[in-house]
Image (cartoon, rainbow, N blue to C red):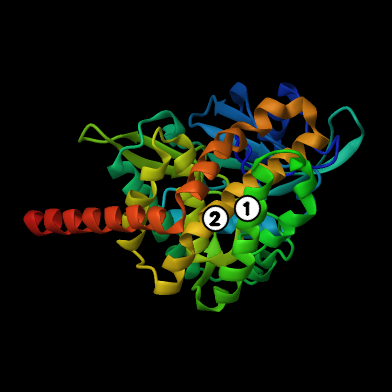
Amino acid sequence: MACCFSSAIMPPKNAKPNLSHSQVSEIVKRLYRLTASVIQSLPSYDDQNFYVAPSEGGEYILKIMNSEDSKNTLLIEVQTYTMSFLQQNGIPAQTALPNTSGERMSLEEIDCGFGSQKYLVRLLTYLPGTTISKVPLTPQLLYEMGKTAAKMDTVIKKMKHPHLHVLEREGFKWSLSNVALLEDYLYVLDGEPLLEVVKSVIQGYKSSVDPKRSSFRKCINHGDFNDLNVLVQPNDKEGYRITGILDFGDMNSGYYIHELAITVMYMMIEHPKPIEVGGPVLAGWESVLPLNEVEKDCLYLLVLSRFCQSLVLGRYSLTLHPENEEYLMISSRKGVNILQQLWELGKEQVEKLWFETAAQLSDKSERQEQTCS
């Protein structure tokens, strides 16, 4: 899961692994025949991640899943397969290395200090770069975000696997198909001015988005295409290029328009002028996959719905784990002001800005391509 509060609900206490460096060294040696000369702990929401540099060369990330998610072996298997499929098809995703048994994941029984539990272990490729959250979000980089998100979903759509059904994930709180489930958690906003806005967005979703879902084009969503799950490196033109996509833990069967809405929402959180984000991301997306009229009509409410998911489920998780307030509330806290602003501007004004900007950028991109050819 992402480091900011994006789409995680904490697992039960003691489900998160707590391996020592000596335990990590033993696992890396036994499962991958590598001698770890450097081991560094990395931040993780509910799993445990380590940077590992073996004396044999190379750089890797050892990921130990929490014991609850480790029970969903088929789901993790499909996620792991997807990462490799994307990488083979030109999308820079992290991939898992085969262990000594030729498997890309292993269920290990480990005692982390509260009795032996089973944890899924994977050794992932280390992708160089910095998270997109740390660089200026220029219109060109936002365009690339939209383009990459659309490419990613169109590639995954072609993927074949015997267990794709596990991605249906009925009742998954973070699916934009399940926005109405937020009503069960609205008590966490009692007394706050924003409660009425959230209620209105959910009602708008139920009346104006849900009935039109049959016109959305289906696909499989990454589901968490946010500012901490995308890596970038400088390019030759004083800008940045996307060099890595991380964290496939929220993959679910959904719709192309859901991925676009999620991408727009998380880029708005990192931008000094959030309202200006939608146009460039939309232009990049439509350079790969133009929206149909129904999808266009629902984009505004779907972006607002994602803000509501982040806010409400963030507050809910905080009631369970108050000690993690700073960690849980990063995107949620920023999102409050943006949600308010989007709601006050209204659908017509926001859409006008997004779609006009997208059209201008698309025309500019076409002219540049004609000049180059």
- Residue 313 in the image, given as x and y percentages of width and height: 71, 45
Quarter holding residue 132: top left
Q: Is residue 273 left or right of residue 12?
A: left
Residue at label 1? 250
The C terminus is located in which quarter? bottom left
Q: Badge 2 local density, few (<14 within 10 Å), some, or many (20+)?
A: many
The N terminus is located in which quarter? top right
- Residue 110 in the image, given as x and y percentages of width and height: 83, 36
Specify which label sits upstream in the sequence, 2 or 1: 2
Q: Is residue 295 above or below residue 101?
A: below
* Residue 307's disc number: none
Mark 2 near mark 1, Cβ–Cβ under 8 Å?
Answer: yes
- Residue 291 in the image, given as x and y percentages of width and height: 39, 68
Residue at label 2? 222
Judging depth in this view, the residue of 57 and 226 nearest the camera is: 226
Judging depth in this view, the residue of 156 and 4 nearest the camera is: 4
Q: Is residue 357 visible?
A: yes
- Residue 271 in the image, given as x and y percentages of width and height: 41, 36
